[in-house]
Image (cartoon, coloured by chain):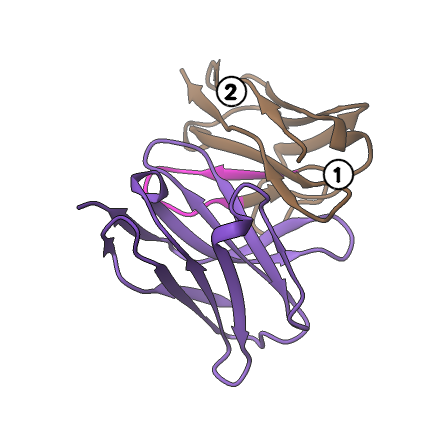
Chain colours: A purple, B brown
Amino acid sequence: QVQLQESGPGLLKPSETLSLSCTVSGGSISGHCWSWIRQPPGKGLEWIGYIYYTGSTNYNLSLKSRVTISLDTTRNQFSLELSSVTAADTAVYYCARVQVEGPTYIDYWGQGTLVTVSS
Amino acid sequence: SSELTQDPAVSVALGQPVRITCQGDTLRTYYASWYQQKPGQAPVVVIYGKNYRPSGIPDRFLGSGSGNTASLTISGAQAEDEADYYCNSRDTSGSVVFGGGTKLTVL
């Protein structure tokens, strides 16, 4: 059973860079596509971007200028960096595995981690 | 980027069928998938592709689609089905898109 676990700071100040990691256990990061998704408190899901095991990325156009997703296959981890955060970036951040060969869907999610941006 | 539109809220009497819809031009080309999210929990996929149910999802959950609309039908809603439901799909650039979500209340 594949499991994903997010880790990283839960509180940031405006203009700082959000950095989160996702550790994948129970399966290899190779051969799959990995994504970050966020959910502001009381609101819906927003896709941030994904990275293939090859390193190829695809980002939400609305966040593209501030987002970097990277892989560390040696640690079976992938990471998110979001620069110049504001209060609008306060959300639960989920890491997830995306199936993209055939219908696109997310089959595994992390439990989510709340990141709050406040001065 | 593409958009997916869902009704914000739907209610259903216990044991009755209910349909939750998702509209968007990208659905003319790509299948929708559906997720159930209960308070404080991560979403769980209940339907993906044409009408595939992951292991453990009850067969009262059914997916369908026509034109620019995808539908999730619960054939007889149970109390435990009360949750938020999200559709998602992709667009021609490979970007993932989510609907705004539908809050299902079981009366």
Say if residue B25 shows up in the picture. Answer: yes
- The span picked out in magenta is B33-44
Amino acid type for the residue under numbered disc 2: Gly
Residue drawn at the location 75% of the way across and 27% of the way down: B25
Image quarter (top left, top right, bottom left or bottom right) of the N terminus of chain B = top right
User: Which residue is nearer to you in this view: A81 or B82?
Assistant: A81
Q: Is residue B46 magenta?
A: no
Res. A1 visible in picture: no
Q: Quick one: label 1, few (<14), some, or many (20+) residues within 10 Å?
A: many
Marks 1/2: CA distance?
28 Å
Asked if marks 1 and 2 touch (Cβ < 8 Å), the reply is no
Residue A31 position by quadrant: bottom right
Is residue B36 shown left or right of residue B73?
Answer: left
Query: Which residue is rendered at x = 52% and y = 57% of the image?
Result: A96
Q: Nearer the viewer, mark 1 or mark 2?
A: 1
- Tell whether position B34 is magenta: yes
Residue carrying label 1: B31
Q: Looking at the image, tell me whether mark 1 or mark 2 is earlier in sequence order.
A: 2
- The residue indicated by pointer 2 is B15
User: Which quadrant holds residue A18?
Assistant: bottom left
Q: At 58% from the left edge and 42% from the top edge, which residue is drawn?
A: B46
- Taking the spot 45% from the left edge, 31% from the top edge, the residue there is B84
Q: Are marks 1 and 2 on the same chain?
A: yes
Q: Position of residue A107 (x, y in %)?
A: 58, 55
